[in-house]
Amino acid sequence: MAWRDHPESLFGEAAAFVTAHGVETPELAIILGSGLGSLADEIEEAVTIPFAEIPGFPRGQVSGHAKALVSGMLEGRRVIVFAGRSHYYEGGDPAVMKVPLGLLTRLGAPPVLATNAAGSVNPAMAPGDVVAISDHISLGAPNPLVGDTDERRFVPMAEAYSPALRARLQRAAARAGLALAEGVYMWWTGPSFETPAEIRLAQRVGADLVGMSTVPEVIMARRLGLEIAALSIVTNYGTGMQVVAPNHMETKHVADAAAPRLKRLVRAFLKESEHG
Ligand code: HPA
């Protein structure tokens, strides 16, 4: 599966389907990563549609819960939340989020805020911290646009992580009394964790964070003309930097514990005006 297996005709089909189920044009779309799904439970006037029912959407489960689109209100703003993203490592398709993002282009093209759990390779970014991604490294990893024949496939990536959204995140963090460092995220496909040598490589090439998601979505979002920013919850230090090797249980546990801080930041972001 790749770019060409998700035809653009599905964007409109998916949009028509969710609109018929009561989903309205959102002011913000939020992609929730591992351990962060509880934000979806706080949406008011929620309309919940399992991914499996929406034309062209990815199938599959996360930790026993069906992935779902949740639409409704948060801080008085209309939002769409993708609760449980699909990852490259689930089926080997880097374009797996093409239709969910494409649907947004047919629903007013709202800004997108992606969230994830990440490892830190920077001693200054500790487990429990929330970090805004400033840039990424995808060293030889699969690109979701392979097979795209449109000229627009040559996507500029100079400001892939929207400076305007990042500035709004910083204002929101200041208002909420939260520290928000920025860092470079390096995508490793997973699902195995990195080796100690890979973590040393990540440090040497200038990464601050390592993780198994987000990068293909950001490339896809930029190709589709969507503005996007991303937040990581640091759940652990990279392999070799801490006594116990990182593992999925720890990732989920720390993400759960830090989720309230991320939720505060998202709520503050929604309250913050677009332009300073
Ligand atoms: N490596 C990759 N992905 C991750 C990690 C990590 O250490 N922690 C959470 N997601």
Image (tube, rainbow, N blue to C red):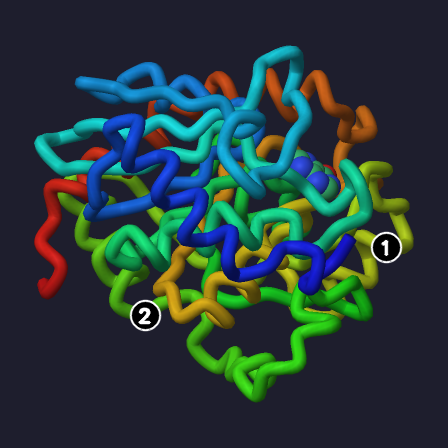
Q: On the rendered structure, is 122 left or right of 21?
A: right
Q: On the rendered structure, is 16 left or right of 270?
A: right
Residue pointed to by mark 2 = 163
CA separation in Å, label 2 and label 1: 29 Å
Q: Looking at the picture, how far across and down is residue 118, in whole percent?
A: 61, 41
Give the mark nearer the N terminus: 2 vs 1: 2
Which residue shows up at 56% across the image and 39% down it? 57
**Of residues 142 and 205, the one drawn nearer to the viewer in this rendering:** 142
Q: Looking at the picture, how far across and down is residue 39, in whole percent?
A: 36, 23
Dot 1 amino acid type: Glu
Which residue shows up at 13% across the image and 37% down it? 77
Q: Secondary structure at mark 1?
A: helix
**Of residues 28 and 134, the one drawn nearer to the viewer in this rendering:** 28
Dot 2 amino acid type: Pro
Residue 249, picture quadrant = top right
Which residue shows up at 57% across the image and 88% down it? 151
> In the image, ligand 1 is in what quadrant?
top right
Q: Residues within 10 Å of mark 2 (few under 14, many from 20)?
A: some
Residue pointed to by mark 1 = 198
Q: Is residue 237 visible?
A: no
Question: Pointers 2 and 1 in contact (CB under 8 A)?
Answer: no
Q: Looking at the picture, how far across and down is residue 265, in whole percent?
A: 28, 37
Vertical comparison of 31 with 253: above or below: below
Residue pushed farthest top?
64
Q: Secondary structure at mark 2?
A: helix
Vertical comparison of 68 with 164: above or below: above
Which residue shows up at 70% across the image and 56% down it? 5
